[in-house]
Amino acid sequence: MSRHTAGPFNQQESVRNTLTHLSSISLQGWNNELLHQASEADQAIATNRAIENLSEAFQRLQDRSNIQEEQIKSLQTSTKARQDDANTGSKALMERLAKVETSNGNLVLEVERLQTENENLRNQVHSLETTENSLR
């Protein structure tokens, strides 16, 4: 009988050992799965942080780009205004130059007229002197 009793006891012990072993394997499997999932979660969190950082960096670049676009527009407006002022100034100078040239032309004509008049007066004086000498 002791053999018969010993048999089931050994069988129960064997079953218990097997269950403990299976339980250990199952827990180890669950533990490995949980570690794997935790690792994936950490990677997902790191990826999300990287995406957020990139998104923030992109937004900063976009903001800088917008500021630079406004500065470019401002410079273009300022340059256009200066160019318009320069064109207006150039036009006014050209008009003044044209008036000066006209005035100079008129002065040249007046000098020529006065020279002719002076020559005529000299001729008259010479003629009068000749007449005066002949009358003497």
Image (tube, rainbow, N blue to C red):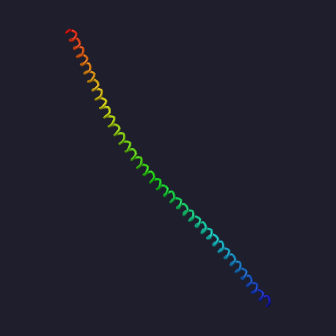
Question: As rendered, which of 37 and 13 lies closer to the eye?
Answer: 37
Residue in view at x 70 percent, y 77 percent? 24
Residue 40 is situated, as x and y percent measured from the top left of the image, at 60, 68
The quarter in which the C terminus is drawn is top left
Residue 91 is situated, as x and y percent measured from the top left of the image, at 34, 40
Farthest-out residue, left: 135
Farthest-out residue, front: 136
4 left or right, relative to 87: right
Question: As rendered, which of 66 and 112 lies closer to the eye?
Answer: 112
Residue 7 is situated, as x and y percent measured from the top left of the image, at 76, 86
34 left or right, relative to 106: right
The quarter in which the N terminus is drawn is bottom right
Task: Report how many numbered discs are placed on residues in the image.
Answer: 0
Residue 55, placed above or below residue 77: below
Residue 21, placed above or below residue 108: below
Question: As rendered, which of 39 and 62 lies closer to the eye?
Answer: 62
Residue 15 is situated, as x and y percent measured from the top left of the image, at 71, 82
Residue 54, placed above or below residue 79: below
Corner quadrant of residue 107: top left
Residue in view at x 30 percent, y 26 percent? 108
Residue in view at x 51 percent, y 57 percent? 61
Residue in view at x 31 percent, y 34 percent? 99
Question: As rendered, which of 126 and 54 lies closer to the eye?
Answer: 126
Corner quadrant of residue 104: top left
Residue 30, placed above or below residue 109: below
Farthest-out residue, right: 2
Corner quadrant of residue 126: top left
